[in-house]
Amino acid sequence: MNQVFRVTVRGQFTNLSDEARRYLVKAQAEHDLFVSAYTPEGTLSYDERILFFNMRYEVHADSEEKALASSFLEAETFLQTMGFAHKQLKANAVDVSQIWNSPNEVAHDN
């Protein structure tokens, strides 16, 4: 069964080139945390100091492990392609299909 996961990959920029830093400064408004979303292609957001970042993915997979692995690989590929040096990548996932099917839902009568 395919489940829907929201995966957040977090990390820290490190030893950014001058070119990468200039790009991030120029694009900062587009990558604010408040305009980020969980998308299949991922959304990058970062703090104003250009120190910490997160990437948000919506992944359809049959296990949390597969969702985490694919998001982690996607984040690594994106960061390398863009030339963003980084460290301390960590990922966590939430199975949103379980939120919709919560056994603790309470029925309310109108």
Image (spheres, rainbow, N blue to C red):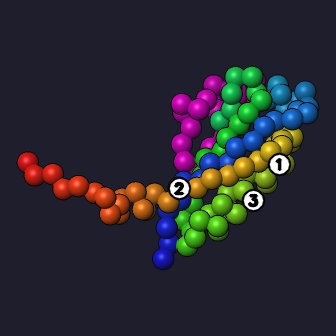
The mark nearer the N terminus, 2 or 3, is 3
Does 91 appear above or below 27? below
Circle 1: element type: helix
Instruction: Identify the residue under disc 1.
Output: 81
Q: Three-letter amino acid code at disc 2?
A: Val
Q: Which of marks 2 and 3 is in front?
A: 2
- The amino acid type of the residue labelled 3 equals Leu
Crowding around mark 3 (Cα neighbors within 10 Å: few <14, some 14 to 19, many 20+) is few
The amino acid pointed to by label 1 is: Thr
Compare marks 3 and 1 and give the one earlier in the sequence. 3
102 left or right of 28? left
At mark 3, the secondary structure is helix
Q: Name the residue rendered at 68%, 32% in the picture.
A: 46
Q: Are marks 2 and 1 in contact (CB under 8 Å)?
A: no
Report the residue at 84% width, 48% height from top.
80
The residue depicted at 54 percent of the width and 48 percent of the height is 38
Give the crowd class for mark 1: few <14, some 14-19, many >=20 residues within 10 Å.
few
Residue 40 in view, yes or no: no
Between 94 and 71, the one nearer to me in the picture: 94
Q: Position of residue 62 (x, y in %)?
A: 55, 73
- Determine the CA span between mark 2 and mark 3: 18 Å
Q: Would you call the spot at circle 2 few (<14 residues within 10 Å), some (14-19), or many (20 or more)?
A: some
The residue identified by callout 2 is 94
In this picture, residue 61 sits left or right of residue 84: left
Q: In this rendering, does residue 103 appear at all?
A: yes
Give residue 73's mark: 3
State yes or no: discs 3 and 1 in contact (Cβ < 8 Å). no
Q: Do the residues labelled 2 and 3 touch (CB within 8 Å)?
A: no
